[in-house]
């Protein structure tokens, strides 16, 4: 088991190391979780080589977020690389900004997690017609809405206040994106009725629900077995 | 949500739970029968009420104080939009403003119920000496004196309120750490405020020529507590709403220097992207200092 002294001997980026030290978390947790989940006899599912589990604890939550940000970044990189026909300049500017934010989120989690990060995921966007404005904005809205419900749904599991603050700092930007995309699709539809409840609260989703949605667009499937 | 498994889990920890909660147990069993009339999000609070009756306990004073702080902001926002909609000829983008008005009034109702259910005393509009949306400390003739006659001023104040609301909820999240019911509810409202902020910014930009984006974009990445580097609204009077101990132009997140990260096209990240990709919190004290006494004053 690594001690803090051991950690300081590892030649990694100082910023990354001190970030992880917030939680006193290490790489060991992920291995422990894999071992534990394989003991569940009643869940007799053969381990699939192409399923990546995010792990447990705060590191698992950060990896869950990292997985979603990888997916969003990959999507917008494709949107800007192959813009739909006659994309208005204002939409190009907005979607480029969003691409840059999502890449920024992805790179942030990658740097922060360092050696605890899950691998790079391979997206599968074969169901999205990138030449169609309707298809692209529809998918963008789905990704942004899903992202908001994901952060809100998993947040109460976060044990470290600094991580919770960062999740909060990202989720409101995702909500800003979601509202913009809603407005681009239909003016004034920045709080769509399927994303809000009767009390005026944004809905939130459990990780299993979020990943069921995300995995449709991932060749590398992701699970979050320690978060029910 | 499986209510019955929750009850079973409690029984494992507290074998007398059944006795304590009886005859309320029937109420739990019957919850599905009125489910169609009760909003899903209201159920945790209905259940919370049952727990409170069963155990004679309530939410902690600190949780109640966070909820009342949130309610204070929501009363301000709801009153602001109610006044705007009632001001003859002011609002032209009705679909936008009525959506936000409706959401803010729902937040007031929701938080009022939640605080009562948790055993607290919710603040009400009568707990304020004044609400002065001109920012005039009760004179009703402050820097935003045209707020309900000049639509552009109204939108500018709306933008500031929404951005500040987002920051205020974010700042309270750590005070609700691990609290499934209240943290989740607070973040769910937080997301709706961010949607509003995005929409008001979009309106101002696309219809009225303001140079704002749906996200707060700063001009400098070195912490500016005054807020000047982050206040992209074009109104210097609200600089403080974008500043604070963790200002909106913060470019270091969790000890990671965002400016050094690779971007989509470069080996580094620009200030505008690094600052817009993350929103920052305001503390309760900071928020109150921004609002009191310019916009409101509590009794006592």
Image (cartoon, coloured by chain):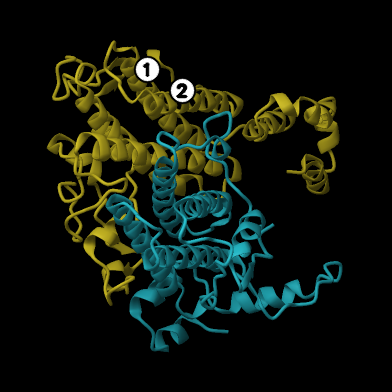
Return the x and y of residue B195 as percentages of the image width and height: 41, 40
Q: Is residue B221 visible?
A: yes
Total number of numbered discs in the rendering = 2
Side (left or right) of A47 relative to A104: right
Q: Residues within 10 Å of mark 2 (few under 14, many from 20)?
A: some
What chain does mark 2 sit on? B
Q: Secondary structure at mark 1?
A: helix
For chain A, give the colour: cyan
Write down the residue under mark 2.
B105
- Residue B198 in percent (x, y) is at 35, 41
Q: Residue at x 41, y 55 (%)?
A: A170
At label 1, counting other C-alpha atoms closer than 10 Å, the crowd grade (few under 14, some 14-19, many 20 or more) is some
Q: Dots 2 and 1: beta carbons under 8 Å?
A: yes
Query: Is B104 situated above or below B193?
Result: above
A202 is higher (above) or lower (below) than A153: above
Q: Which quadrant: the N terminus of chain B?
A: top right
Q: Colour of chain B?
A: yellow
Residue that sits furthest to the front in the current view:
A85
The picture quadrant where one finds residue A46 is bottom right
Mark 2 or mark 1, which has the lower sequence index?
A: 1
Give residue B82's mark.
1
């Amino acid at each position: 088991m690594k001690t803090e002294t051991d950690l300081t001997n590892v030649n990694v980026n100082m910023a990354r190391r001190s970030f992880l030290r917030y939680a006193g978390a290490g790489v060991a947790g992920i291995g422990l979780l894999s071992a534990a989940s394989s003991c569940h006899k009643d869940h007799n599912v053969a381990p699939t080589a192409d399923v990546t589990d995010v792990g447990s604890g705060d590191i698992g939550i950060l990896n869950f977020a990292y997985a979603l940000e990888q997916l969003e970044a990959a999507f917008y990189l494709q949107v800007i690389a192959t813009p739909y026909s006659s994309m208005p300049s204002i939409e190009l500017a907005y979607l480029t900004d969003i691409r840059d934010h999502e890449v920024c989120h992805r790179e942030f989690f990658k740097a922060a997690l360092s050696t605890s990060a899950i691998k790079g995921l391979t997206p599968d966007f074969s169901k999205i017609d990138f030449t169609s404005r309707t298809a692209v904005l529809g998918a963008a809205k789905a990704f942004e809405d899903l992202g908001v419900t994901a952060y809100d749904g998993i947040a109460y599991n976060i044990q470290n206040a600094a991580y919770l603050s960062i999740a909060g700092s990202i989720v409101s930007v995702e909500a800003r994106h979601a509202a913009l995309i809603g407005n681009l699709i239909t003016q004034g539809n920045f709080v769509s009725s399927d994303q809000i409840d009767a009390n005026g609260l944004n809905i939130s989703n459990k990780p299993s629900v979020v990943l069921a949605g995300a995995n449709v667009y991932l060749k590398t499937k992701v699970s979050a077995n320690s978060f029910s | 949500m499986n209510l019955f498994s929750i009850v079973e889990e409690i029984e494992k920890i507290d074998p007398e739970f059944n006795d304590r909660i009886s005859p309320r147990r029937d109420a739990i069993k019957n919850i599905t029968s009125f489910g169609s009339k009760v909003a899903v999000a209201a159920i945790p609070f209905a259940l919370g009420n049952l727990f409170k009756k069963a155990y004679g306990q309530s939410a902690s004073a600190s949780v109640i104080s966070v909820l009342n702080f949130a309610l204070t902001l929501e009363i301000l926002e709801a009153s602001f939009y109610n006044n705007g909609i009632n001001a003859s000829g002011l609002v032209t983008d009705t679909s936008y403003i009525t959506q936000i008005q409706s959401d803010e009034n729902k937040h007031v109702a929701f938080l009022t119920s939640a605080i009562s259910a948790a055993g607290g005393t919710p603040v009400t509009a009568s707990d304020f000496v004044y609400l002065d949306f001109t920012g005039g400390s009760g004179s009703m003739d402050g820097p935003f004196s045209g707020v309900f006659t000049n639509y552009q001023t109204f939108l500018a104040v709306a933008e500031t309120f929404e951005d500040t609301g987002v920051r205020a909820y974010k700042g309270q999240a750590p005070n609700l750490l691990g609290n499934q019911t209240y943290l989740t509810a607070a973040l769910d409202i937080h997301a709706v405020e961010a949607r509003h902020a995005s929409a008001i910014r979009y309106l101002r930009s696309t219809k009225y020529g303001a140079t704002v984006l749906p996200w707060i974009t700063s001009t400098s990445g070195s912490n500016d507590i005054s807020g000047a580097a982050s206040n992209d609204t074009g109104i210097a009077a609200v600089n403080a709403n974008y500043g604070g101990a963790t200002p909106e132009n913060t470019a270091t997140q969790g000890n990671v220097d965002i400016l050094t990260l690779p971007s989509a096209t470069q080996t580094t990240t620009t200030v505008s992207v690094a600052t817009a990709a993350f929103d920052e919190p305001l503390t309760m004290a900071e928020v109150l200092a921004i609002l009191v006494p310019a916009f409101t004053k509590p009794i006592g």
